[in-house]
Image (cartoon, grey):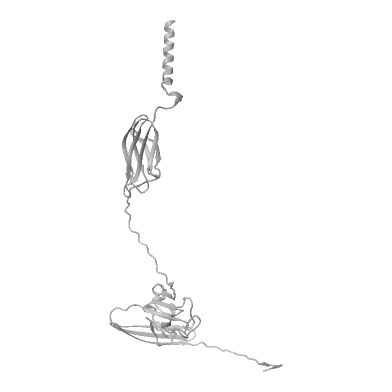
């Protein structure tokens, strides 16, 4: 009987030993923590929101983690005693690893200041290509870039002006500025002695760099009695020699025409000569009826 009592007591002791070994309240034993501070190595400033992850050293299992505060400080708690390593990462920086952190029960391990280096990524150069607008507006004028027009390969200055606001070209090639044919044509800033429409028809589009339409000319252009100025800027001629161009055109109803221009250049001296012939016959009839009423009599 006495032996049975001793045996029963031994069995109960073995069963209750794990329970008695636990701390009161069923809480785990003393835990440890890791603290530190994250800084930018180049600017010597704290890095906020850096990711800090703690791994168990023996199997690289993620245990806990946190982020740094505004002053770069962090604290990772609730860690059991043991050996760990931690990794610090942030966008735009190289990762930083602290290896073999030995934690004791109830202790705090301070890894100190951790400097992160900015990550420099080499990329290929990027080339941005944009076309200059054909028509631009300045304070006192409109500027037409002839190089961006389809008519630059052929045609005349009249063809360049067809789609310009405030400029109108009729079916016969006559040009009007703001509804008036009384305007001044300048070639490289110098007045042309020809009629405005004739002068524009004699200038090949291929020789034009840009056209300036000035609707509010200053006093230096002597603007009295004119609706504006069309200034044709020619391309810079290089070298010396003789060049020329001939244009012909034809249409229905016995309409045809031709123009030619010859340019001679020697140093800073440039001489131009041109001729133009245009036939724009418009056959047809016109009837006019007019009546005059005086009192009760119509005549």
Single out the residue that lies furthest toward the top: 1
Compare residues 165 and 264 and report the one nearer the observer.
165
The N terminus: image quadrant: top left
Q: Quadrant of residue 75?
A: top left
Q: Position of residue 116 (x, y in %)?
A: 33, 45
Q: Quadrant of residue 53?
A: top left
Q: Position of residue 222 (x, y in %)?
A: 43, 84
Which residue is rendered at x = 41% and y = 13% of the image? 10
Q: Is residue 287 above or below residue 4?
A: below
Q: Is residue 201 above or below residue 60?
A: below
Compare residues 67 and 261 and report the one nearer the observer.
67
Q: Position of residue 277 (x, y in %)?
A: 42, 88
The C terminus: image quadrant: bottom right
Q: Position of residue 60 (x, y in %)?
A: 35, 35
Q: Is residue 256 above or below residue 131?
A: below
Compare residues 240 and 192 and report the one nearer the observer.
192
Single out the residue that lies furthest toward the front: 71
The answer to whether residue 232 shows anywhere in this view is yes
The answer to whether residue 200 shows anywhere in this view is no
Q: Quadrant of residue 287?
A: bottom right
Instruction: Count all numbered tags in the image, as a single digit.
Output: 0
């Amino acid at each position: 009987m006495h032996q049975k009592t001793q045996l029963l007591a031994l069995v109960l002791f073995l069963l209750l030993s794990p329970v008695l070994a636990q701390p009161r309240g069923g809480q785990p034993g003393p835990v440890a923590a890791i603290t530190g501070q994250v800084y930018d190595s180049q600017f010597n400033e704290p890095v906020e929101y850096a990711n800090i992850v703690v791994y168990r050293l023996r199997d690289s299992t993620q245990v806990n983690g946190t982020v740094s505060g505004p002053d770069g400080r962090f604290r990772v708690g609730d860690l059991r005693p043991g050996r760990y390593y931690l990794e610090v990462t942030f966008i735009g920086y190289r990762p930083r690893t602290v290896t073999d952190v030995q934690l004791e029960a109830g202790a705090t391990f301070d890894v100190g200041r951790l400097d992160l280096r900015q990550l420099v990524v080499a990329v290929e150069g990027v080339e941005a290509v944009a076309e200059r607008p054909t028509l631009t507006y300045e304070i006192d004028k409109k500027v037409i870039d002839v190089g961006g027009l389809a008519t630059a390969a052929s045609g005349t200055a009249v063809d360049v002006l067809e789609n310009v606001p405030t400029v109108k070209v009729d079916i016969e090639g006559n040009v009007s500025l703001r509804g008036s044919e009384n305007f001044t044509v300048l070639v490289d800033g110098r007045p042309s002695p020809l009629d405005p429409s004739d002068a524009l028809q004699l200038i090949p589009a291929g020789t034009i760099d840009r056209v300036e339409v000035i609707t509010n000319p200053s006093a230096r252009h002597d603007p009295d009695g004119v609706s504006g100025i069309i200034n044709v800027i020619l391309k810079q001629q290089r070298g010396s020699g003789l060049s020329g161009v001939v244009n012909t055109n034809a249409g229905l109803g016995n309409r045809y025409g031709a123009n030619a221009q010859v340019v001679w250049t020697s140093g800073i001296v440039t001489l131009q000569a041109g001729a133009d012939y245009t036939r724009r016959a418009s056959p047809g009839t016109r009837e006019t009826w007019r009546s005059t009423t005086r009192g009760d009599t119509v005549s």
